[in-house]
């Protein structure tokens, strides 16, 4: 059997559910160009044997990635990368970072410390996400 | 799909003491089920009822659609690895496999041999000379090579070191992918079960506190923190699991299907361990309240 291109790992204390950690690791590898179109993800058996996790966790992660159009399952063979994330959003990162830096400078000038900034960001982020759902 | 385990008002009494009571659960097939609770909660009793080693005092139980004590065909479908993964100290690894072959009609000899080789167990080695981790792996091999539709494991990793625990769970999970069977395993530590289980049963003081798919349990339980508020002023669809108050602040763990919109609350995510602990605390609080009411 061929060596898998990437290996998964799990952080038990991150607060992020295991299936989401797998999804994020694939996305991350795609962004970094570690995973390219045509690459095979670890099989469910490989991932399960390595991480000692429930097979449904891996299946759920792969279904999510499939739903996002990033991978496709070939029955009996495995799951393969069908798209890339390197070119689409990377271009937008620069300007967004610049805006964020400006905003951070403004927040500091207004007297917010690191914790207040983080709390403000997280509550706004959560409210915005919830409104999106609602 | 038939249920892997269905219990209706199931109870087991020893003399005056109920080891398990009013247990009603319905576990669909294809899950790895974690049975969690403190020592003495009734976990072993439930597992022994499921594997036909005990007969119920009250209620009924069906496993894979059949009665657990109904005979050979039923026994062949259900594997049981007892607490501390016992093996015969005087028998060699190879003799264990021969014994397994003789006792189990669906014995998978090739799988047993392959697994023993992969684990690096020497066939002529006596089981008594194996390390704790190796003994557990041998017991697991016997359970797996039986090719059951349901494998029950009672505290399989309790006495193992962290590495052996991990290797045991890796082997078990890998086998579930390969052979598609259901698993019920117990532990008094949530951390042992967190990664491997997709269905959880919390058993405290001989009663099931909650049971359900792990994802669903996690998405329907929330911790609310905010200005002090009495429980009767919470919405009716928010079931209080645990509550604590200071003069000014209230902290609740609630179960609800609806999202929580009340801006007064800071809502935080619960880990599986938090969730289990909340139910254990709930039980302690309920018992204390009952005791107080009796005294009044």
Image: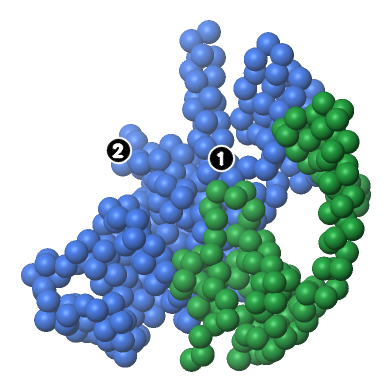
Chain colours: A green, B blue
Mark sitting on residue B15: 2
Quarter of image, res B260 = top right
Percent x, y for residue B105? Answer: 31, 85
Residue A96 visible at all: yes
* Sequence-first tag of 2 and 1: 2
User: Gap between marks 2 and 1, in whole Å?
Assistant: 35 Å
Query: Circles 2 and 1: CB distance less than 8 Å?
Result: no
Q: Chain of mark 1?
A: B
Percent x, y for residue A10? Answer: 54, 60
Mark sitting on residue B223: none
Residue at (39, 80) in percent of width and height:
B147
Residue at (31, 86) in percent of width and height:
B114
**In the rendered image of this protein, does residue B4 appear above or below residue B259?**
below
**In the rendered image of this protein, does residue B262 appear above or below residue A53?**
above
- Between disc 2 and disc 1, the foreground one is 1
Locate residue B279 relative to residue B169 in the image: left or right. Answer: right
Q: Chain of mark 2?
A: B
Percent x, y for residue A102? Answer: 88, 44
Quarter of image, res B225 = top right
Q: Secondary structure at mark 2?
A: loop
Residue at (63, 61) in percent of width and height:
A21
Q: Secondary structure at mark 1?
A: helix
Mark sitting on residue B274: 1
Residue B105 visible at all: no
Locate residue A63 relative to residue A58 in the image: left or right. Answer: right
Tell which of B16 and B197 is nearer to you.
Answer: B197
- Is disc 2 surrounded by few (<14), some (14 to 19) or many (20+) residues within 10 Å? few
Q: State the count of labels.
A: 2
Tell which of A42 and A92 is nearer to you.
Answer: A92
């Amino acid at each position: 059997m061929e060596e898998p291109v990437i290996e998964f790992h799990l952080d038990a204390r991150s607060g992020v559910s295991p299936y989401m950690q797998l999804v994020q690791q694939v996305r991350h590898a795609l962004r970094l160009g570690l995973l390219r179109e045509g690459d095979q993800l670890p099989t469910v058996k490989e991932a399960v044997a390595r991480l000692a996790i429930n097979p449904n966790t891996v299946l759920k992660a792969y279904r999510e990635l499939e739903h996002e159009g990033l991978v496709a399952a070939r029955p009996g063979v495995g799951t393969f990368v069908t798209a890339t994330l390197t070119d689409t959003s990377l271009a937008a990162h620069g300007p967004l970072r610049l805006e964020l830096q400006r905003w951070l400078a403004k927040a500091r000038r207004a007297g917010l410390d690191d914790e207040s900034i983080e709390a403000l960001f997280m509550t706004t982020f959560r409210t915005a996400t919830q409104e999106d759902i609602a | 799909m038939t249920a892997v385990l269905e219990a209706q008002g199931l109870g087991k009494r020893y003399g005056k003491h109920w080891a398990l009571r009013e247990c009603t659960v319905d576990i669909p097939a294809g899950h790895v089920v974690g049975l969690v609770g403190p020592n003495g909660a009734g976990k072993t009793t439930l597992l022994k009822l499921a594997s036909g080693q005990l007969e119920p005092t009250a209620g009924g139980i069906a496993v894979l659609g059949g009665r657990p004590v109904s005979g050979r065909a039923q026994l062949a479908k259900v594997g049981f690895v007892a607490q501390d993964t016992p093996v015969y100290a005087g028998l060699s690894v190879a003799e264990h496999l021969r014994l397994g072959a003789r006792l189990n009609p669906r014995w998978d000899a090739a799988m047993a041999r392959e697994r023993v080789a992969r684990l690096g167990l020497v066939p002529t080695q006596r089981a008594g000379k194996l390390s704790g981790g190796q003994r557990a792996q041998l017991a697991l091999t016997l359970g797996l090579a039986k090719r059951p539709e349901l494998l029950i494991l009672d505290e399989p990793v309790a006495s193992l070191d962290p590495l052996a625990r991990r290797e045991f769970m890796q082997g078990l999970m890998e086998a579930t992918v390969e052979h598609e069977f259901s698993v019920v395993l117990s532990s008094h530590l949530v951390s042992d079960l967190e990664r491997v289980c997709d269905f959880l049963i919390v058993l405290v003081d001989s009663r099931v506190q909650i049971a359900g798919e792990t994802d669903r349990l996690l998405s329907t339980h929330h911790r609310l923190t905010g200005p002090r508020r009495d429980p009767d002023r919470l919405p009716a669809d928010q079931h209080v699991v645990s509550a604590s108050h200071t003069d000014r602040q209230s902290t609740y763990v609630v179960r609800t299907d609806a999202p929580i919109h009340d801006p007064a609350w800071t809502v935080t995510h619960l880990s599986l361990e938090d969730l289990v602990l909340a139910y254990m605390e709930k039980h302690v609080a309920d018992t204390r309240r009952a005791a107080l009411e009796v005294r009044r």
